[in-house]
Amino acid sequence: MRPSPAAAVAAFLFNTGCGYIGPTLVPLANVPAAPSDVAAIQRGAKLIAHFTVPGTITEGYPIKGDLQLDLRAGPAPDVWSESEWAAQAERVAPARTTKLPPARPGGTGQQLAEYEFSSTAWTGKTIVIAARVIGSNQKASNWSALITLPVVAPLAKPEQFIATPLANGIRLTWRGAGGHFRILRRAEGSDGFAELATTTAPEYLDAGAEFGKTYTYQVLAFAAVAPQKEAQSDLSGEKTILYKDEFPPAAPAGLIATPSPATVELSWDSNTEPDLAGYRVYRATNGGAFEKIADVNEIPAYSDHAVERGKTYRYTVTAMDKSGNESSRSATVEAALQ
């Protein structure tokens, strides 16, 4: 007697040890994901672009094998066609690729592709820039989001860049044309430049500079060419300065000398410098030369006990800062002991 079909299936499952038959797996397309962060800007007579090289295929799995990078730039056709633009656009070779740090400890860092190419052929035109990548299987990603960029005549880079130390900061001045200027600063111990400020005038005071530190500055001009788009000049030359405290405090004001039978009491107005260290007291006796008689702390007062009746004393005071700079002398006062 032959077994029924249901019995035959049950016997097969029992003998093979399989209680479940899963769905058929769909093969992966193995198409790279498109670049998602393409950015571009004009600097001087160059166009600069970059993007992070995708690390996965469209299904989210890691890409296997090497990738070809394909960034193109060119005018848009009168009637937009991606294929027509891509066929006519210039394919640009990357200037360099840089390995980025991993997003998390133990992770794998991605590559940053960077491009620099001439803007001269497109001056006065608006171009479209986009990028894609091509896998080792010759399958190409979609194009990235399109960047539309007006190309203008190069802005002149700032010249005659000067850094001058002042008591309240480092004053930067330069000559150049542009709607605005951007100041970059690299502080001592920093890996690279960071934006410090933007100004419309060809000068800036870095009031945040600290005495004893070395700073390097650069400046560039930029102008708006479209909403949320700008063209930049080339960077100025670098200007490096060790910001030393060579600036004495102001001379103390309001000095008063009050004689008593055995002392002369001195008082004056407090100085307001944040790095004030104290004061120095000078005295001259009976028309003689001034000599230092004391260094005192930040309290603006002093009692001179080394005095004698019948003599006339003149006094003046200076202020000292923490770097050892001494101010000019205050106005002179006189006290006569009877």
Image (cartoon, helix red, strand yellow):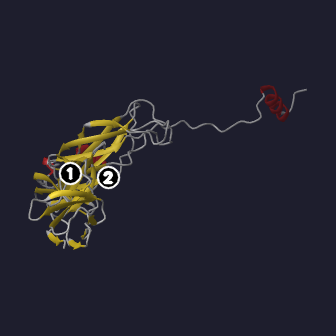
Q: Secondary structure at mark 1?
A: strand
Residue at the (28%, 36%) spot, across then down: 96
The quadrant in which residue 55 appears is top left
The residue lying toward the viewer, choosing from 318 and 113, is 318
Q: Using the image, tell me which numbered label, if any, was put on residue 42.
A: 1
The residue lying toward the viewer, choosing from 304 and 241, is 304
Could you say where residue 304 lies in the image, as x and y percent from the top left?
25, 64
The quadrant in which residue 153 appears is bottom left
**Amino acid, disc 2:** Leu
Q: Quadrant of the N terminus?
A: top right
Q: Give the residue number, with chain letter if any, for mark 2.
A: 146
The residue lying toward the viewer, choosing from 336 and 203, is 336
The residue lying toward the viewer, choosing from 7 and 236, is 236
Could you say where residue 157 lies in the image, as x and y percent from the top left?
12, 52
Whether residue 231 is visible, yes or no, is yes
Q: Quadrant of the C terminus?
A: bottom left
2 lies left or right of 206: right
Residue at the (38%, 39%) spot, across then down: 100
Could you say where residue 90 lies in the image, as x and y percent from the top left?
22, 42
Q: Compared with residue 150, is residue 110 higher up or lower down, i.e. above or below?
A: above
Crowd band around label 1 with a 10 angstrom C-alpha radius: few (<14), some (14–19), many (20+): many
**Amino acid, disc 1:** Gln
Could you say where residue 276 lies in the image, as x and y percent from the top left?
27, 59
128 lies left or right of 316: right
Q: Secondary structure at mark 2?
A: loop
Label 2, label 1: how many angstroms apart (C-alpha)? Answer: 16 Å
Front: mark 2 or 1: 1
Instruction: Pick whichever of labels 2 and 1 is earlier in the sequence.
Output: 1
